[in-house]
Amino acid sequence: MKKIGILGGLAWPATIEYYKAICQLSQNHHANLNLPGPSPMPEMCIESVNINYSYNRRGSFGDEHSWRDYDAYFHAALKRLEDNGVDFAIIASNTPHNRFDSITNGLNMPVLSIFEAVAKTCQINRIDEFLLLGTEPTMNSGIFPDYLKRHGISAFVPSDDTVKSKVADLISELFKGKSENGRSRMDQIVRSSYEQMEIKPKVVCLACTELPLVFEGKEQLETFEVNGVLYLNTTIIHAVATFRYAIEV
Amino acid sequence: MKKIGILGGLAWPATIEYYKAICQLSQNHHANLNLPGPSPMPEMCIESVNINYSYNRRGSFGDEHSWRDYDAYFHAALKRLEDNGVDFAIIASNTPHNRFDSITNGLNMPVLSIFEAVAKTCQINRIDEFLLLGTEPTMNSGIFPDYLKRHGISAFVPSDDTVKSKVADLISELFKGKSENGRSRMDQIVRSSYEQMEIKPKVVCLACTELPLVFEGKEQLETFEVNGVLYLNTTIIHAVATFRYAIEV
């Protein structure tokens, strides 16, 4: 198995879900081989950064220079993973993917993008439209929707700022590992967003790796249905793509 | 905060508990500072190794040469953490601590020992005797009991091989992240061990970092009481010592 590099801590609860998913996938993969001892695991190096540092160095889209310190912090962490000897890496969070090209520029190892993993999952499941929920940069930069559009997928974000700030509040709680009534708040966010579109809720992409944590018991599923809405769990979609790549010859 | 190196994957469920504990301790530590953005976190590098590889390279105590590959695998992982730039490291597992000196020999960074953290906790809580449960090497090598004896603490292990193998069975399930009826099996192990000693159960040291997982809801506590027995959770004792060292000036 290839050695996996994970840029984590963005935030820590999602890093746990990624790590758990990869380890459980490896257990399942080796379950019938009857090897002596505990299940073989891919070697991993997790570089867990200080999310407070990066958060306070977010720039403004359209002002390339304003992202310099943000990009440099993540690039240096990925460079340490490369120096560690990992065969490839992932960034365990959606938000930095808005700066993916600048962050990964100059690295010699592959970095598997979460945006690409989500687009592939949509194509396999014939999903061509969804509501996109995530952090402020992910919902407002237009970068993920543009990427998806090139793959034939329409993503729309809540048009109402009140709804957007409800998403942000929920995420800031989940960054601490838990939320109060997260599930019903999510329901409300989804319903309000679709009401504005005057269409019925169908597919919601949880494009912040902490958002799936509001659905207790479903955190480790790539996709799941609740009240007739199909949710895409970007965390596990990305983790599954990571493990598959690690075992590819 | 100092950058923390963690040698993990031994097994993965305990690595999650360590990481979670350190992140939650950092949240609590910064809770009243009202800093902008998510809580500051210590930077960490987790080198998660393949437990199947190390398990199959365990040697025999008394035969120094037989441990060569086992020691070298862990030493190399710690060296990568040192090269990464961590300020100090921990090995997130009791078992490799039976080979602590050989594994850490030649490193330039401090490595905080779990045995030392447990001994300190016992001294603070005036605990001078306990039942020690752990993997086969930890229960049979006599290394941890000898270390404790030098700190005025008597540790005894189950004298019956049937009881020892029940501990081993429980651990091998917990390595996969869950156990069937773990709690009642633990109760039985503790009662049988004390019966053989003809004394009443008092203090049990869970000296395998997965064992605390049988006590759902208590995995993040350093010590906890169940049915009149005080349990020492070596995982969290070690994680707390790690975070304290990381914030020490």
Image (cartoon, coloured by chain):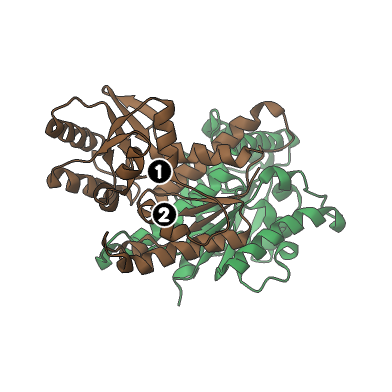
Chain colours: A green, B brown
Alpha-carbon neighbours of circle 1 within 10 Å: few (<14), some, or many (≥20)? many
Side of A133 relative to A66 (left or right): left
Q: Do the residues under discs 1 and 2 have CB atoms within 8 angstroms? A: yes
Numbered tag placed on residue B129 in the rendering: none
Is residue B174 among the parts visible in the rendering? yes
Q: Which residue is mark 2?
A: B100
Residue nearest the viewer, comparing A117 with B205: B205
Name the residue rendered at 30%, 65% in the picture. B56
Name the residue rendered at 22%, 45% in the picture. B167
In the rendered image, residue B72, in percent from the top left (x then y), is placed at 43, 67
Quadrant in the rendering for residue A67: bottom right
Q: Amino acid at mark 2?
A: Phe
In the rendered image, residue A137, in percent from the top left (x then y), is placed at 73, 48
Numbered tag placed on residue B115 in the rendering: 1
Side of B240 relative to B98 (left or right): right
- Quadrant (top left, top right, bottom left, bottom right) of the N terminus of chain A: bottom left
Above or below, comparing residue A3 to residue A238 in the picture: below
Q: Amino acid at mark 1?
A: Phe
